[in-house]
Every structure is written in structure tokens, then in C-alpha cells.
Image (cartoon, rainbow, N blue to C red):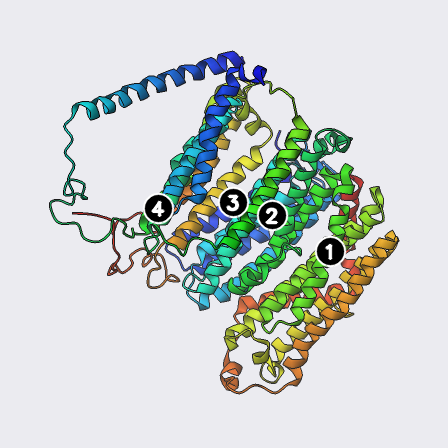
Amino acid sequence: MPNQYFGDYITVLVFMAVGAIIVGGAVVAASLLAPNHPNKTKSEIYECGINPVGGGWSQSHIRYYIFALLFLIFDVEAIFIFPWALKVESFAEAGMGGFIFVEMVIFIVILLLGLVYAIRKGVLRWE
Amino acid sequence: MNDWLTQAENWAFILIALPMVLGAWRSVTSRNVVHSVLFLVITLAASAALFLLLGAEFVAWSVVLVYIGAVIVLFLFGIMITRAPLGMETELSHSNQTKLGAALVSGALFALITVAVITGFGETEIVSNPTRTSEIGQSMFERFVIPFEVVSVVLLAALIGGIVLARRDPAEPGDSSSSLGGAQSAHVTAEGGEA
Amino acid sequence: MIDYHALAPELILAGTVMAVLIVDMLPVRKHWTAVVGLLGLFATVVPILTLGFCESLDFCDYSGSREMFGGSYVIDAFSLALKGLFIGSAFVAVLLSVGYLESNRFWQGEFYFLMLASVLGALVMASSRDLVTMFVGLELVTGPTFLMAGWRKGEARSNEAALKFFIIGVLSAAVLLFGMSLVYGVTGELTFTGIRAGSVGVLDGDLSGLFIIGVLFTILGFAFKVSAVPFHFWTPDTYEGAPTPVTAYLSVISKTAGFVGLLAICYLAFGEVTTLWGTGLWVLAALSMTVGNLIALRQTNVVRLLGYSSIAQGGFILVPFGAAIAADVTGSDLEEAFFATVTYLVIYAFMNLGAFGVVIAVGNRLRSAEIKDWAGLFSYAPGLATMLGLFFFSLAGIPPLAGWFAKFVMFRSVLASGSGWAGALAVVAAVNSVIAFYYYSKVVVSAFMEKVPDGVPVAEIREQRTAPSLQFALVLTTIGVVVIGFYPTLISGLAEAAKTFASGF
């Protein structure tokens, strides 16, 4: 079992290494082959041809934060669905399919209520 | 020592632990908050890899999905919505005295836990015994049904409370919902968009 | 499979929590959310009663304690008594909030939603007998309170309160979780009974170091939650800055939930290693009483005074256990200590909620919680001043008010255990009762005897009426404080609850 487990992940590792080599190789090859003439204007921030004003750091609106928050909450919800999905079948075979299904439905409905709340109160509207 | 180096797991451990420590160190010492957050990504990724090495698959991928995927994004947004550019702010840096105190406390804690772990486990070899995600599902729906459902209420409460605290108040929060959300839109904030 | 009758209180309250949120989304007046919440709390009492008096009911076929999920979740007399306490206090806390929220244009539906969700966490904690359930329950208790503490969004004070509370709360949760993970790692068990069985002899083995750190961190985490000295720093600022109904909630329900978790973990899970935490509890009790009271002496603000006084009261609640451990009391002899603590928690809930009710009512008129502004309160608001006297004297433990009985059973349990260390703790408690009497009576005397300071619009205040919900809450708590004081036998049923818990030890 452990060897099977690590074997699986070694496959993943090899895959990632090949990917890294291809991308890294392309970058190295490009830097070797491409002509290189740096100057000041080239390294400026591109802003549709207008001269950039102010720093690169500006305050963003808090509504982005609410979207990030929603994303986080539903991300955590998704995490709980994986172990459930792996177990539905074996629970159903043991005659507890209804139970495990209802549990997850309750879990999702409770969180969906949050989404309904957000929509109903208009925080998702982009003003 | 020679014995120790012959095992592949130990090499994997070193390869994971070094960037982890480096990332943690830089995320504390970095003077730019955004860099701190990005170094934290390295640390979190390395800790996910450590969990994989220990056979805790589910925990590892939870760390990747939730922490690297979502919490870091929330961190970055949290930094971006603050008013002043915090980039190289010196006000954020602590005095040497505070640094010394923090170093003492964390050093003492580190020493305490290290000593306890070494006396506790010493030469014990870790028997790698992967916990598959389905086993977690099994115990989740057999033993921990109540915490599982309670977690959804915790998440919902965080969601609702977070929305209330983060959103702009409409003119009359106490009114019926018709006026909620239809707030005045004449506000001036520097948004990060370009032409 | 799942005993729905035993879970009914949690299920009904969970339904209420969702119903409050749904009502908030409907186009109706916001005070309906409070009404739905109160009705739901009321409905939750029904299954608690049917479970509690199961023997005398025809349709109820169980008796004693019911265990579910392999001993992770237990419904017995002890947990039922605490659930009743949580529901009752939550009922009063919601009543306290109604007028406050409406007078200041706050978000209302969401507030009741968060408060009831937090109460749901307290119910889960009362029954949980394993680390995972306990931790998730505790998170549900504290999570919403962070948000409620910052409910006065525009005010720096409230933001500060929420932020301090949040940072300390998250730190303590992290410490607690780390401790729990070490305990689990060493014993390999999550249920309290399993941990207890697994911890036999662990102190002599190699893993003793890790186990000691685990136990200490777990207890430390809870000490933050109950704001025992020296882990109390967040309390006064949070109490002062948070909206007053939230402060009342924090000082009663969230604190009681912390005590429940602390006691259950100490006695059920760490029962074999009392040497590790026995002295700790003694020190926490003595320090909390003394430091809380001494700092309360110097307060000029009523809310801060009540904040420090609640730290001190937390010390009194710990006294029976500090004494019992010091005297090596174990087994069913602990009954007395558990009875004393549960009684104290019930009475404390009544008097503290009442005291905060008065603070809300007076603060709403005077727009100030400074003691000097409260001088002469009796001359223009005699009813409120009388209630202020009632609750403060009850907190001080003056007979025949309920606080007297709480102190009485506390001292009785300490003296029953009868050892030198227990006696010493009793002396500390006695001295502290005297100090506490001084600062409580100072406020009351000033409200009754002194002249009204200039600038208080007396005529205007005479005109103002207290919100009906707040009146109702004050009447409820007053009745509780007076009736329990005269007929303490009313709550002697709690002895039954104490017995079931102690017998498990």
C-alpha cells in the first residue's frame, strides 16, 4: 500500500519535472537566442500609451473582498464534498444511502442560504 | 547518519523542509507585505508536500485548495483594500525590543517542543501508512456527523457576518429590505483599474 | 441510529437560526426576526423538558444518559441543565438586544442570526464528549461573537473591541488546537473516555513531555475563553467597546460555554493526570478573584467595572474545583463541587444579565456609562435605580438575594473538602467577597444618595420609557434573583445534574 501510494505521487512528480524542464528550457533558450537591448522606456509600466501617473499601488474597492470571502467559504465547502463523494456508494450499499445523501443536502442547503442572502441583499450587484 | 541518508524519504524531506524554513523566515523578515504573503505560499506549499510525504493526502490537498487557493487571495485583497500603500512602510516595522521579545518567546517555544518531540520519539522510525480520503469520509459520516453539520453553520455565520461588516451601510439599515442594497452610489474611491 | 428526540433541542434551534435568516430576507419589518428567534428559543425548551423529565412521561422510553456516535455526543442530566441555562440566558440576551438595536439603526436580522448560531454552538458544547465536536462547538460559540463585538461599525471603540477579541480569540483557538492535536497524538484517542483510558501511565513514559504540553495548551486555550487571570487582557477593552447586549452575551453565555468545556475536558479527559492541572486551577481561581476585584476597585466606568467583576466572578466559579483538586477529592464526592459550580453559573447568569439590562436602560437615557454621571439616579429613575441595587447587591452576595445562595454553596463545597489548601482558597474567596462588596455598593450608594450632577437632563429622562422588551428582560431577571434568593430549593434539582456528571468521573 505505501509503495503504491508513493508510486502514484512519483508519477505526478515526474510529470511536474517534465513540465518544468519544458517551460524552463523555453525561457533559457529565449534568453540565449533573443536580442537584448534594455532601455528605460521599455521597462516602464504600460498604460495604453499614456504616461503612467502615481505609484503602482492603489487602493481597491472593498467589494472585491466580499467576493474573495464568498470564494473562501465555498472553497471550504467543496473540500468537504470530496470525502463524501468517495463514500456515497459504499454507504448506499450498506443501506444508508438516504442518510448520507440527506446529510450532504443539509450541509449544502445551509451554505446556499448564505448565497441567497448575498444575492437578496444586493451585495453581489456590481454598482 | 549514513543510514539516514540512504533513504529516499529523508532526501525528499530535506528538499521540502529547506524551502519551507526559508519561506517562513522571509515571510517574517520581508519588509514588503505582499512579498510576505508570497513567501507564505512557499511555506504552505511545502507543508502540503510534507503532509503528502506523511501519507495525509486529504490534508495536503486541503491546504493547497483552501490556504494557497483561497486564504492567500483573501490576504492579498485584505492588503489591497487598505488605504495607504503598505509596501515599504516603516511604521509597520517593530522596534528592536519587540523583535527581541518575539524572538525569545518563539525560540523558547521552539526549544520546548523540539525537546519534547525528541525525547518522545527519538529514534522511532515513521511507518508510512497513508490515510486515504475515503477513510476520512467513513469516519466523518459515522462518528462526526454533528461536527460536520455544525461546520456548515460556522461557515454560514462567517459569511453573513463578514458581509455585514465588510459592506457599505445603506442609508437606513433598519428599514425593510427594499431599501437595502440600493445604496447611494456617489462615492469616490481610487479603484485599481486602468483604461 | 440517530436519536432524534435527544437531538431535538439542537435541531429546533438550528431550524430557528435558519428561519431568522429567511425572515430577514423577506420584505417584513425587521423586528419579526427577533420574534421568530424568541419563539424558536421557547420551542427549544420543550424537548429539553421532555428529555429532563423522561421517566415520568409515557411516550419517552429512555432514562438516564443517552450516548450517540460512539460516546462522542452525550445527553445526560448535566448537559440538559446547561442547555436549559443557555437557552434561558439567550432568551434574555435577545430581549436585551431588541431595544438597543432599534434605537441605533443597526443591522438586526443578521445580529439575531449570529447570536442564535452562537447559542447553538453552546448547546453542542454542553453535549460534546470528544475533542473534534468540542472544538467545532467552541468555534461556533466564539466565531459569531467576534463579529457581533464589531457591530457598531462606524465607531473606533467597537472596531478595537472586535479586533482585540478576534486576535486573542484566534490565538487561543490555535493554542487549544495544537494542545488537542498533541493529546490526540499521544493517546491516539479523540473521545474523552478514550483519552482518559489512554493516558494511564503516560506520564512515566517517553511521551510524557508531549502529553504535558498538550494538556497545558488545551487548558490554556480554555483559560483565554473564560478570561481567567492572567489570560484576561482582552476582556475589559472588548466589553467596553462592544455593544452592551453583546457584552452581556459574552460575559454570560460565551463564558459559561468556556467553563463547560474546561470542566468536561479536565475531569473527563484528563482525570488521570490531575497533578498536571490541579494546582493550575487553584492558581487561576485565586488570581482571577484577586486581580479582577482589585482592578475593578479603580474603575470609573460601569461597563468596565462589570467586565472586571465578571473576571472575578469567573474566579469564584473555579473555586470549588481548585479546592476539590487541592483536597484530592475524587469520585462521587465531587458532586458537591459540580453542584456548587452549576448553581453559581445559573445564578450568575440571572444577575449579570440583569445588571447589563440596567446598564443598557440607563445608558440609553444618559448616553454615558461613567459612574459619576449615574449619581442620584434614584431621584429621577427610581425603578431602574432599585433594580441596579438589586442586581449589584446580588452580585456582591448579600442575603436574601440569589447571589447569596451561590456564594453559600461555593463556600460549603470548599469547606466540605476540608484541606489546608482548600481552606486557604476559602480565605482568599472571603477576602474578595468583601472587596467586591465595597465597589458594588459604591455604585449603588452613589446612585441612591448623591446629588444629580449638572448637565443631566432630568426632566427629559423622566419622560423616556424603557423599551418593552427590555422591561420584560429586567422583570424576568429580577424575579429570578429574588425568587431563587428566597427559595433556593427551586434549583436544587441541579444536584441531580451534578450527580450524573460526578458519577462519570
Along the horizontal axis of the image, is C12 left or right of B64? Answer: right
What element does badge 3 sit on? helix
Query: Alpha-carbon neighbours of circle 1 within 10 Å: few (<14), some, or many (≥20)?
Result: many
Q: Are marks 2 and 1 on the same chain?
A: yes
The numbered mark at residue C161 is: none
Residues A14 and C350: in front is: A14
Say which residue appears at 49% left-offset and 83% top-offset.
C460
Disc 3 vs disc 1: which is toward the camera?
1
Distance from Cα at disc 3 to Cα at disc 2: 16 Å
Depth order, front residue of A88/C431: C431
Q: Nearer the viewer, residue A33 or B92?
A: A33
Residue C348 in sight? yes
- Is disc 4 in the same subunit as disc 2? no
Q: Which residue is the site of mark 4?
A: B77
Where is residue C292? Give x, y as percent. 67, 63
Q: Residues within 10 Å of mark 4 (few under 14, many from 20)?
A: many
Quadrant position of the N terminus of chain C in the picture: top right
Q: Are marks 3 and 2 on the same chain?
A: yes
- State the residue at coordinates (83%, 58%): C424
Instruction: Tell me the amino acid under the disc marked 4.
Output: Phe
Secondary structure, mark 1, is helix
Residue C466 locus on image (x, y percent): 53, 73
From the viewer's perspective, tell me whether residue C50 is left or right of residue C115. right
